Structures are given as structure tokens and as C-alpha cells.
Amino acid sequence: MSEVGQAPRDTVVTRMWKRGGELELLHRSMGFAALGMVTLMPLLVVVAAAAPFQHTGFAQWVVDGMGLSAHPAEAVRHLFVAPRRVLSATSALSLASLAVFGLSFAASVETGYRKVWDLPASPWHSVWRRAVWLAALTAYLFVEAQSGSVLDGGAARTAARVVLTLVLGTVFFCWGQRFLLGGRISGHQALPGAVFTMAGLVGLRAFSSWVFSPLIVTNAVSYGAVGTVLVVQSWLIGVGFVVLGAALLGRELRTRSAKDEPPAN
């Protein structure tokens, strides 16, 4: 009788709630947002400013990811320095420092993935994987943002951009999770989490367009640039929650399906 009563409680939702608490998912998402704002964004600002055919700068990456309308988008663009000023104020040493600091962001993502899969720490010499992943992340964000200007206008181009974004994002998050973990999980194990990550980011973009977009306008009037920064930071917390939470959901569903499979003869 006790087994019958306990069985319904062992669901994916309850497992996710328990595992999310064990992993301190919200705390890690806040760390993801803080490191992303302090260490990753300055690096991406410089990279976007250095691109010869990028005219909108890094701000467009954020505007695109949040799905902002005209007025909130303008408030976000005011947060970032003009490309020419960025390049004139950036030295080789500064760029190297930004790259090193960016590695701490990659390390935090790797740690989150390791906790999801209950894996031990990677050896010290695997730091090169973080550098490669960081470069791949920068390229992925750049291509995704550029697709907005290249494939702008018309239903066919919009549909092509949606498909490109979903496919490229799924490939990146599947590869990235497996690569950061040193190949200790397979592509088949990482794929569900990658699919859920893209689904979550699509949902977050819709939520951001509905909630954060008008909130930016209100906060920009009430608090100025600080209010806009707080909204962007809240969005980054959501991104961190999606990235790590989707990986956790992918693992839980795969674990449950493996338990439900009949034993081999």
C-alpha cells in the first residue's frame, strides 16, 4: 500500500524540484547573470565593435535576444559605448584581460553542467576547452544577431531565420555541453537538454517582449540607465535558469526513459 501511495509522487516535476534545490539552480542562475554582465558582456562589446560589417554593435544582440520594441530597444542601446570609442579605448592588454575574465564565465557554465550530471571536476589542463567554448559562443551570438539584418523582411526570410536560429542553437548547446564536460556525456545525452534550452529561450523571449519591454520604458523614466540595467540583469538571470534548468530537465527525462526501458534479454 505504501509503495502505491509513493509512486505518483516520483514524477519528473518532483524530481526537478528536488534536484533544482540540490543544485541551487536559482543561485547559480544569479551567478550566471552577474558573471555574464561583468565578464562576458565587455568582451562581446569589443568583439562586436571590431567587426568591420557590424553597424549596430553589441546592443543589438541584447535587443534581439530580449525581443524588445522600438522605445525599450533605444534605452538598451544607450547603455553601451559607441563602437569607435570602444576600439580607441581598448588595448591589446585590455582585450587579453577581457578574454581571461570571460573564461570565468565559461568555468561557471561548466560547473553548472557538471553538477547537473554529477561529474567530478575537470583536470586543470582542460581550460583550453573553456577558451574554445567561449570563442564558439561569441561566434554563435554574432551569427544569430547578424541573421536579423541579413534575413530581415518578408515571411520567407523570417521563417528562414527562425529555422536557422533554432537549428544553430540546438547544435551549439548540444555540442557545448558535451565539449565543456570533456566528452564524458554523449551527444544523445546532451541533445534533449539542448532542445529544451532553445524552447526555453523562445519562451523567455516572448515573456521578455511582453513583460520586460514595457518595464524598461517605465524604469528608464523613473531610474534612468540603472533601471534599464536591472531589467537586463533580470533577463540574464532568466537565461541562466533556462540554460541550466533545461540541461537538468533533459537529464531527468533521459534517466526516466532509461528506467522505463525493458531489460535486454
Image (cartoon, helix red, strand yellow):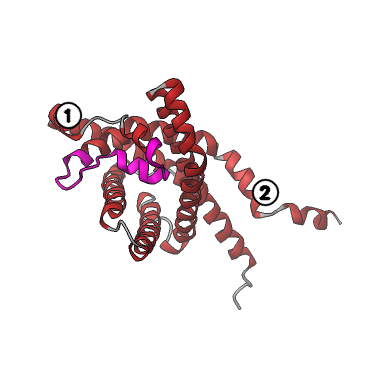
Residue in the foreground of this view, choosing between 185 and 226: 226
Q: Amino acid at mark 1?
A: Arg
In percent of width and height, residue 216 lies at: 44, 32
- Residue drawn where x is 58% and y is 39% of the image: 22
Which mark is in front, 2 or 1? Answer: 1
Residue in the foreground of this view, choosing between 73 and 92: 73
| Residue behind mark 1 | 85
* Sequence order check, earlier mark of 2 and 1: 2
Residue extending farthest bottom = 265
SS type, badge 2: helix
The answer to whether residue 128 is above or below residue 41 is below
Q: Amino acid at mark 2?
A: Thr
In percent of width and height, residue 131 lies at: 27, 44
- Residue drawn where x is 60% and y is 64% of the image: 257
**Quadrant in which the C terminus is drawn:** bottom right
Write down the region rendered in magenta: 47-72
The answer to whether residue 57 is above or below residue 170 is above
Question: Is residue 118 something that shows in the picture?
Answer: no
Circle 2: is it few (<14), some (14-19), or many (20+) Cα within 10 Å?
Answer: few
Image side of residue 154 versus residue 230, left or right: left
C-alpha distance separating marks 2 and 1: 51 Å
Answer whether residue 110 is magenta in the image.
no
| Residue behind mark 2 | 14
Which quadrant would residue 104 be assigned to in this image?
top left
Circle 1: is it few (<14), some (14-19), or many (20+) Cα within 10 Å?
Answer: few
